[in-house]
Image (tube, rainbow, N blue to C red):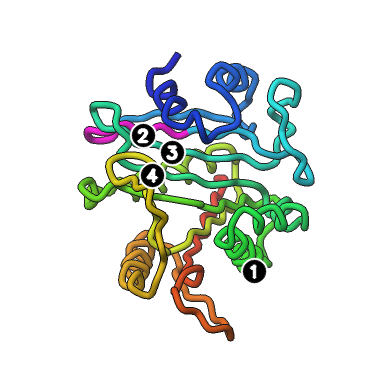
Amino acid sequence: MDAFLARAFDVLKDWIPLDLDTYETLLQHSGAADRACYICKKADAYTYCLFSYPLYCKDGIPFHYGTDLPGSAECEQWILLVFDENGNVIADLAAQGMSLHELAKEVNRKRLEEESDWLYWQSEILLDVSLNDPSDSEAVLITNAYTSKRYRGQHIFHTMMEMLETAILSRYAGGTLLLCISLDPDVACYGEDKSDVPYIYSMKDEPVRLYNAEILRHMGWQAFKLETDEPVEDGAILWFAFHRVQLVSL
């Protein structure tokens, strides 16, 4: 048993739909192209633990662990936790991944809309910017990405995003990867910044949104603000960024 994977499952035990034993069995039966993987690497003084597991099969049918084959999954959950030398979570990232073909299906768009308004707009954005991309291109909706305040400025966020992209692209000989993220300030789910008080978005967050946009622009992303005819008081769910990565087989 990998110690960091065990630590990740201990941290996430109230959030994920399977236990460590079930996941390790799933990995044993998963191939390189299946929607289940685990990657652990050390960078500087920190350990990056990235893993994914199936969420849904074709047409939004929930994946059943123990009965469904890994190759039947069409949608997966990505999770990346970054640990310090003491095993404390100092940063995290989460995302859902599926093909554009699956993302375009009404059942999946409806599911994402029910999960959050942010996911609804991310799916709409990716479908809008991907009109000329093949339907088997991979779409990734990033639901959260947070680095603890005292660890910022060390390129941890950049490393997390790079690790996610590399892991996904390693499955393909060629193709297109499309990613989308909200630029609203994220809230800590774990670690020393975690708070039990609900976060209230407002226009005071606008400088943070603009700062997040600048960071992603430097990473090659395109940041933009949605236009709406409806009055917006809190400024949330308007700023987003997307990124297109093309893997060319030589």
Reading the image, the residue beneath label 3 is 80
Task: Please tell me which residue lies in front, 91 or 71.
Answer: 91
- Whether pointer 4 and pointer 3 mark residues with C-beta atoms closer than 8 Å, the reply is yes
- For marks 3 and 1, the one nearer the N-term is 3
Label 1 crowd (10 A; few <14 / some 14-19 / many >=20)? few
The magenta stretch is 43-50
Q: Is residue 134 left or right of residue 42?
A: right
User: Alpha carbon of mark 3 to alpha carbon of mark 1: how far?
Assistant: 27 Å
Mark closer to the observer (3, 1) = 3
Reading the image, the residue beneath label 1 is 128
Q: Is residue 192 left or right of residue 48?
A: left
Kindly indicate the quadrant of the structure image that contains residue 205: bottom left
Residue beneath the point at 38% across and 23% down = 4
Reading the image, the residue beneath label 2 is 48
Q: Main secondary structure of the magenta part?
A: strand
Judging from the image, what secondary structure is the residue with disc 4 in?
helix
Label 4 crowd (10 A; few <14 / some 14-19 / many >=20)? many
Q: Amino acid at mark 1?
A: Asp
Q: Amino acid at mark 4?
A: Met
Mark closer to the observer (4, 3) = 3
Q: Which disc, if any, is residue 160?
A: 4
| x then y, percent, for residue 72 | 74, 33
- Whether pointer 3 and pointer 1 mark residues with C-beta atoms closer than 8 Å, the reply is no
User: Alpha carbon of mark 4 to alpha carbon of mark 2: how far?
Assistant: 8 Å
Label 3 crowd (10 A; few <14 / some 14-19 / many >=20)? many
User: Alpha carbon of mark 4 to alpha carbon of mark 1: how far?
Assistant: 26 Å
Residue beneath the point at 47% across and 73% down = 224
